[in-house]
Image (cartoon, grey):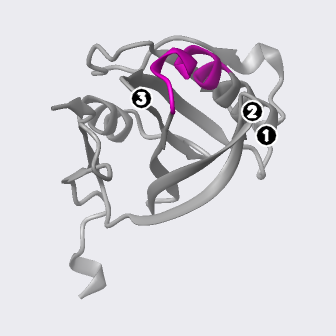
Amino acid sequence: MSACAPTFNWRELPIGSTALQALFPCKPETVTRPVPLAQVERDVAMRSCDTGGVTFAVAHAALSQPGQAPAVLSDWRASTLSGLRADAATVSSDPPGGLPALPQLLVLRVAGAPGDAQARSLLGVWFATGRDVFAAFVMGPAIPPEAAETFFSGLRLR
């Protein structure tokens, strides 16, 4: 049976009780944990799945005030970048293809070092609407462009 299963089996799912819908290429699991963002510990719920050697994820945190969003988004993106230990030369803010207009958008594109078996590439976006902040990303040794475009074009605010 597993030989017949497609690598990318897309499905549209809500992100918690927020206004965001996302397309996932596999059945995601949800994990919630506290994360320090903009000097405050916040509960971040992440829906993610792995398929074809690539991780697809959408994370969400609720803020007490919408005005906190710019600082939280900036800190969240910087924290993600520092966790990747990427060389500045590999970092870009070019948005992914197919990305819809999202409020307060920040983008991060990190290319893994060629020939480094442990290197990870990441394409991520951070955005906010009201009191909700989100991070959506694709990460793996190599990111299939068609899968990334489908994933990011599937981010929709209702």
Marker disc for residue 24? none
Give how far across and how far down residue 13 sits, in percent.
Answer: 22, 53
Q: Work out whether residue 80 or residue 25 is closer to the camera in this orientation and state it.
A: 80
The residue that disc 2 covers is 79
- Give the distance between the C-alpha atoms of the residues marked 3 and 2, in whole angstroms: 20 Å
Q: Work out whether residue 33 or residue 12 is closer to the camera in this orientation and state it.
A: 33
- Give the distance between the C-alpha atoms of the residues marked 1 and 2, in whole angstroms: 6 Å
The quarter of the picture where the C terminus appears is top left
> Bounds of the magenta span?
64-74
Q: Residue at x 84, y 35 (%)?
A: 85
Estimate how packed mark 2 is, as few (under 14), some (14 to 19) or many (20 or more) residues with alpha carbons within 10 Å.
Answer: some
Q: Are marks 3 and 1 in contact (CB under 8 Å)?
A: no
Q: Residue at x 46, y 20 (%)?
A: 66
Q: Magenta stretch containing residue 70, yes or no?
A: yes
The residue that disc 3 covers is 131
The residue that disc 1 covers is 83
- Give the distance between the C-alpha atoms of the residues marked 3 and 1, in whole angstroms: 25 Å
Say which label, 3 or 2, has the lower sequence index: 2
Q: Is residue 61 above or below residue 49?
A: above
